[in-house]
Image (spheres, coloured by chain):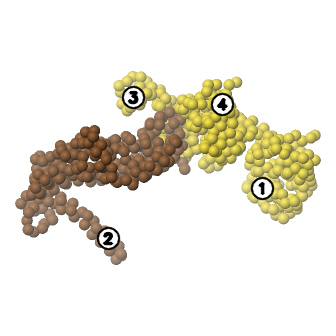
């Protein structure tokens, strides 16, 4: 299967700084790919390289197998929804949505006001544009707001206008740059569903750039984890979460940072710990009366659905564990024992790559 | 009212009166009939106000021509200034190219050079190519404006880069972005600059005096000088009427544009 869009060995340097380092990444027809990384890891630059807003220092960008490395953003016909929505503040909602169609479908003289009076083709073209704008506006419940300016809309409405402007052009790919980062929790959940539904309905290849792993894992078909300008791992969300291929990915993924016991020290959990580092997610580190590791409770963070317990073992290693719902909570200063199931251990070798536990 | 308020109010009024008095006097004299102007006693308001001086200034002198010249010259300067400055300021604010910082530094350095320093070389060059005594001589030296470039660059730099990128994705050319996104969003600054430009060039006497000798090309202040020379100063009424006519467009224009000064567009519709 040829990918809709492909970065092939792309490197982007800004002066001496390498923002994107020899990245090869495919975006397939109809898939929803999330590019996940901490801020400054190069994920936004990767998106800009895909979109044609940035030219690669080395490597190629392929659109449907064709090299478009030197083509402009508009000729690649990609849609991009920006974090700030980037609506034209001096234009109405209608004009905002119609802009990409006007720029693609009309020649320069046809865009002059009054051109519709004198030319029949202009009238036809404008009619088509009008149809498309109204269709996409109805789909996103904007039909009553078309004459407003963006400044007169709520944040959620502005976001729908940005979506409409991106969708109206029937793009070759749809890019979303941190679309949920400034929304409150409730609106965020709604928008997540809306974007998922939009993807299902339109079938365009979607690329979501985010620093929020919950967004990436919940929305995407595949997740690419980016660390320091490179793709550290790519796979379905379950695989990325359950089998991180490197220590760096393991430490990045997960709402709570993974506990990693260095080799030697880790042998208390499993005999392989003598030669391998062992990671245990806080969720999988069980507090009880029995267990191979002794620890002292240092403090508790109550977060509603869960409580994070910060612990320290006799050697001074900090560990975390999660307690859910009605589980009995220890008090700070209590001595407890910690255990973990063998299946919950993530072994890493001295280079930080995933290893296998000897059975 | 507290005494401090009264005192500062009084001082401000005094200052305003000192600034305004010559103008009031000009308008007053322009409305007085000829026999009221040269009287021993000073009266601020005309006893028998008349528009005869205005009629005379408009029909028997070249003042309409001077006003027309003023419109041609200031309008020409402003249009060309904007045609050059808007794309340049946009490029300086939102495009990355080698030497950009250096170029912007040069613009700021050029702000420090008074026009009078470059006037003589420009005069010599224009005389070489035979441009003296033309509208071009009055317009061309001012079409590249470091002040306007600086002002507009600062205004355009406030426009978020994401909005510019959005316009690129939508298929606008760089020139299109300069005129259809940057220009309307920078409109308050464009208008402020236009007021500066029009005021400066409408009132400019120095360069028209240097570059032109023909009365047909005289701009308003230059024209007033011709007028005074011809009439040897005794026909004060029409002279003041002429001066009022020449000042009026600026004052009316300023009053009309005043509200746009405070209108900010650039922030709306963008989440920050």
Label 3 or label 1, whichever comes before in sequence order: 3
Residue at x 54% of width, y 29% of height = A75
Q: Position of residue B70 (x, y in %)?
A: 24, 46
Do the residues bearing badges 2 and 1 touch, measured as CB atoms within 8 Å? no
Q: Residue furthest left?
A: B35
Tell if the residue under mark 3 belongs to the same chain as the one under mark 4: yes
**Which residue does the numbered mark 3 point to in the structure image?**
A109
Circle 4 Cα neighbour tier, 10 Å, few/some/many (<14 / 14–19 / ≥20)? many
Disc on res. A308: 1
Per the model, the C-alpha gap separating discs 3 and 4 is: 36 Å
**Which residue does the numbered mark 4 point to in the structure image?**
A6
Q: Is residue B142 left or right of residue A305?
A: left
Do the residues bearing badges 4 and 2 touch, measured as CB atoms within 8 Å? no
Instruction: Say which colour chain B has.
Output: brown
Q: Foreground mark, 4 or 2? A: 4
In the rendered structure, the residue with mark 1 lies on which chain? A
Disc on res. A173: none
Per the model, the C-alpha gap separating discs 2 and 1 is: 65 Å
Residue B209 seen in the figure: yes
**Which residue does the numbered mark 2 point to in the structure image?**
B9
Tell if the residue under mark 3 belongs to the same chain as the one under mark 2: no
Q: Foreground mark, 3 or 4? A: 4
Q: Nearer the viewer, residue B55 or B150?
A: B150
Assign a secondary structure to mark 3.
helix
Q: Is residue A52 left or right of residue A322?
A: left
* Quarter assignment of residue A36: top right
Assign a secondary structure to mark 1.
strand
Circle 2 Cα neighbour tier, 10 Å, few/some/many (<14 / 14–19 / ≥20)? few
């Amino acid at each position: 299967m040829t990918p809709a869009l492909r970065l092939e060995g792309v490197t982007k340097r800004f002066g001496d700084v390498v923002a994107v380092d020899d990245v090869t990444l495919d975006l397939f027809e109809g898939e929803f790919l999330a590019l996940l990384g901490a801020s400054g890891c190069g994920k936004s630059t990767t998106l800009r390289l895909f979109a044609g807003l940035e030219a690669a220092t080395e490597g190629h960008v392929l659109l449907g197998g064709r090299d478009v490395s030197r083509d402009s953003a508009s000729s690649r016909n990609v849609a991009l929804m920006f974090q700030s929505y980037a609506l034209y503040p001096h234009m109405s909602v209608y004009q905002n949505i119609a802009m990409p169609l006007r720029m693609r479908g009309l020649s320069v003289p046809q865009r002059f006001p009054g051109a519709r009076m004198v030319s029949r083709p202009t009238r036809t073209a404008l009619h088509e544009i009008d149809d498309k704008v109204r269709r996409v506006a109805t789909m996103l419940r904007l039909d009553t707001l078309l004459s407003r300016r963006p400044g007169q809309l709520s944040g959620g409405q502005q976001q729908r206008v940005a979506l409409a402007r991106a969708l109206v052009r029937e793009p070759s790919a749809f890019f979303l740059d941190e679309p949920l980062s400034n929304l409150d929790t409730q609106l965020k959940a709604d928008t997540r569903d809306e974007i998922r539904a939009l993807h299902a309905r339109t079938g365009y290849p979607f690329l979501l750039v985010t620093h929020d792993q919950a967004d990436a894992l919940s929305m995407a078909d595949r997740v690419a984890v980016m660390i320091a300008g490179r793709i550290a791992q790519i796979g379905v969300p379950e695989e990325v979460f359950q089998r991180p291929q490197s220590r760096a990915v393991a430490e990045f993924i997960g709402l709570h940072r993974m506990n990693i016991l260095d080799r030697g020290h880790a042998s208390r959990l499993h005999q392989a710990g003598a030669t391998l580092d062992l990671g245990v997610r806080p969720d999988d580190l069980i507090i009880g009366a029995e267990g191979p590791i002794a620890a002292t409770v240092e403090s508790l963070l109550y977060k509603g659905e869960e409580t994070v317990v910060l612990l320290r073992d006799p050697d001074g290693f900090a560990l975390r564990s999660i307690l859910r719902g009605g589980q009995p909570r220890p008090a700070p200063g209590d001595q407890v024992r910690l255990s973990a199931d063998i299946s919950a251990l993530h072994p890493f070798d001295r280079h930080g790559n995933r290893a296998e536990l000897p059975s | 009212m507290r005494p401090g308020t009264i005192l500062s109010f009084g001082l401000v009024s005094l200052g305003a009166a000192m600034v305004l008095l010559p103008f009031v006097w000009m308008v007053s004299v322009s409305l007085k009939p000829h026999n009221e102007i040269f009287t021993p006693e000073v009266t601020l308001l005309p006893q028998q106000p008349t528009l005869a001086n205005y009629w005379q200034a408009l029909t028997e002198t070249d003042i309409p021509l001077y006003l027309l010249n003023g419109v041609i010259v200031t309008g020409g300067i402003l249009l060309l200034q904007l045609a050059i400055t808007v794309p340049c300021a946009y490029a300086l604010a939102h495009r990355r190219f080698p030497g950009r910082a250096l170029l912007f530094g040069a613009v700021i350095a050029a702000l420090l050079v008074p026009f009078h320093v470059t006037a003589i070389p420009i005069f010599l060059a224009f005389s070489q190519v035979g441009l003296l005594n033309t509208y071009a001589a009055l317009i061309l030296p001012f079409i590249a404006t470091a002040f306007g470039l600086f002002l507009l660059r600062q205004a355009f730099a406030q426009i978020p880069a994401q909005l510019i990128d959005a316009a690129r994705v939508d298929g606008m050319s760089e020139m299109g972005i300069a005129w259809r996104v940057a220009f309307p969003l920078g409109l308050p600054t464009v208008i402020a600059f236009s007021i500066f430009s029009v005021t400066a060039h409408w009132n400019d006497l120095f360069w028209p005096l240097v570059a032109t000798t023909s009365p047909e090309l005289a701009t308003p202040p230059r024209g007033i000088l011709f007028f005074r020379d011809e009439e040897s100063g005794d026909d004060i009424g029409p002279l003041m009427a002429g001066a009022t006519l020449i000042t009026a467009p600026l004052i009316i224009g300023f009053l009309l544009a005043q509200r746009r000064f405070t209108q900010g567009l650039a922030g709306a519709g963008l989440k920050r």
